[in-house]
Image (tube, rainbow, N blue to C red):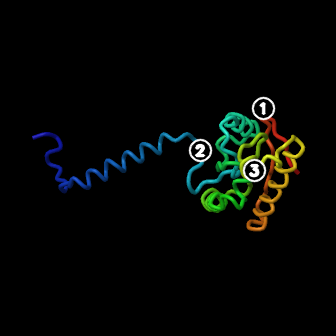
């Protein structure tokens, strides 16, 4: 007789054993998350909307970190950023943006949105055409017009929201649009 032979326990079924293992694995996984990483039901500073352009991924991360926003924002990526959020050619993209914004508000108490377009955007060329981006001045005007349109649409639906808009150059510098 061992020390524990006198303890009687109900027979554990295979199903209950697997549930216990799954629960333990889930708890173990959750315990590995770094402090400060946003979780469902938590709070993040903002929702960031950027373009999918691979050339700027590092610059966007550097920019957000420099602003003190590391691990403090939700990130939505759509081709064209502001153009992806509001265009007639790909209306499903707009639906995705609005659904993500609503979810970020609900889950993470987001109260700010930052929309960050970028120079030399292929989506702008494809959706608006070459004349909309034919030179630096025309390109700037196209982005500013679109950024204002999305900001206005957000404020109509969510008047309490703060909305920042900007244009990133390919070197990572950002022009804040006011």
Residue 166 horizontal/vertical position (percent) = 81, 46
Position of residue 4 relative to residue 15, above or below, is: above
Residue 130's disc is none
Q: Residue at x 77, y 58 (%)?
A: 150
The quadrant in which residue 84 appears is bottom right
Q: What element carries label 2?
A: loop
Asked if marks 3 and 2 touch (Cβ < 8 Å), the reply is: no
The quadrant in which residue 139 appears is top right
Q: Nearer the viewer, residue 174 or 34?
A: 174
Q: Which residue is drawn at 19% across and 54% down?
A: 9
How much space separates mark 2 and mark 1, taking CA atoms?
28 Å
Q: What element carries label 1?
A: loop
Where is mark 3, residue-wise? 115
Disc 3 residue crowd, few under 14, some 14–19, many 20+, Cα 10 Å: many
Where is mark 2, residue-wise? 37
First in residue order: circle 1 vs circle 3: 3
Residue at the farthest left position: 1
Position of residue 107 relative to residue 27, above or below, is: below
Quadrant, the N terminus? top left
Residue 20 horizontal/vertical position (percent) = 31, 51
Residue 171's disc is 1
Q: Describe residue 131's horizontal placement relative to residue 104 as left or right.
A: right
């Amino acid at each position: 007789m061992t020390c524990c032979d006198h303890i009687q326990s109900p027979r554990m079924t295979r199903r209950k054993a697997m549930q216990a293992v799954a629960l333990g694995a889930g708890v173990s996984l959750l315990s590995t998350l770094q402090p400060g990483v946003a979780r469902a039901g938590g709070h993040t500073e903002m929702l960031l909307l950027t373009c999918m352009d691979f050339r700027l991924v590092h610059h966007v991360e550097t920019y957000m970190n420099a602003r003190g926003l590391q691990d403090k924002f939700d990130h939505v990526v759509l081709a064209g950023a502001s153009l992806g959020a509001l265009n007639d050619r790909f209306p499903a993209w707009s639906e995705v943006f609005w659904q993500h914004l609503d979810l970020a508000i609900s889950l993470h108490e987001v109260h700010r949105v930052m929309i960050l377009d970028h120079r030399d955007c292929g989506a702008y060329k494809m959706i608006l055409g070459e004349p909309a981006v034919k030179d630096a001045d025309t390109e700037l005007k196209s982005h500013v017009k679109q950024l204002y349109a999305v900001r206005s649409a957000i404020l109509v639906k969510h008047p309490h929201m703060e909305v920042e808009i900007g244009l990133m150059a390919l070197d990572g510098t950002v022009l804040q649009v006011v």
